[in-house]
Amino acid sequence: MSGVSVLMDFYAFNDFMKNERLLFCYRGAITQAIMENAGETLKAHFELTHTQTARAMRTFSAFVELMQNIERYSPESAEPPVTLEGKNGIVAVGHTGKDYFLYSGNTVSQEKSTLLQEKLSPIKGMDAAELKAFYKTKRREGPDEHSLGAGLGFIELARNCQTFDFDLQAQDNETTFFSIRVLV
């Protein structure tokens, strides 16, 4: 690819991000240090734009949850040795004016895909009261065997967002691309 065509493509990418109102997009390895640095970037945006504190906190919390899910559950990160290439994902943050939307995506195993479908489908259809009750129930039960945390992250994410949606798209016989979109 020539340097000129890359620059022209980058110009188109810039226009795409502007038109879609994307503030931040990261694709690559997810590590603790990258999460911290990306989080600082998002916090700086909130300060510069004087974003309402409650909305900024909910958006930041959603951002951290999405990044942690990539870092924890990408299939390559489950087995040592962990490599930078093993925790790849994509995260994007944008705004609609007063609201923020966040996207994330990463590859998961087919087995994990099935578990995610079973776990997230009920959450997706719950209203605020149902989510609150479900959260309390799950909190008392403790983490399930497949969780690397308390197992409450997706429920908490759905509780703090106006909309919560996910998609699982098979890539091949072994892997699925898992994506989430939330509106805060």
Image (cartoon, rainbow, N blue to C red):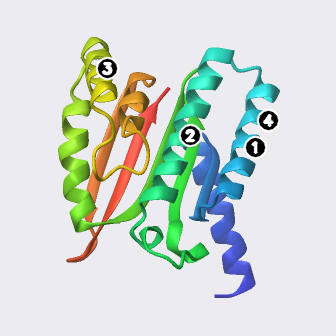
Question: Quadrant of the rendered structure where residue 157 is?
Answer: top left
The residue wearing badge 3 is 136
Give the quadrant of the N terminus: bottom right
The residue wearing badge 1 is 41
For marks 4 and 3, give the one nearer the viewer: 3
The residue wearing badge 2 is 63
Secondary-structure class at tag 3: helix
As drawn, is 54 to the left or to the right of 103? right
Along the viewing direction, whichever of 8 and 77 lies nearer the viewer = 77
Along the viewing direction, whichever of 41 and 16 lies nearer the viewer = 41
Alpha carbons under labels 1 and 2: distance apart: 11 Å
Alpha carbons under labels 4 and 2: distance apart: 14 Å
At label 1, which amino acid type do we have? Thr
Badge 4 density bin: few <14, some 14–19, many ≥20, Cα 10 Å: few
For marks 3 and 2, give the one nearer the viewer: 3
Q: Are marks 4 and 1 in contact (CB under 8 Å)?
A: yes
Numbered circle sitting on residue 132: none
The residue wearing badge 4 is 44
Eyeballing the image, is 4 above or below 11? Answer: below
Badge 3 density bin: few <14, some 14–19, many ≥20, Cα 10 Å: few
- Sequence-first disc among 1 and 2: 1
- Sequence-first disc among 3 and 2: 2
Along the viewing direction, whichever of 147 and 162 lies nearer the viewer = 147
Alpha carbons under labels 1 and 3: distance apart: 33 Å
Q: Are marks 1 and 3 in contact (CB under 8 Å)?
A: no
At label 3, which amino acid type do we have? Lys
- State the residue at coordinates (71%, 57%): 33
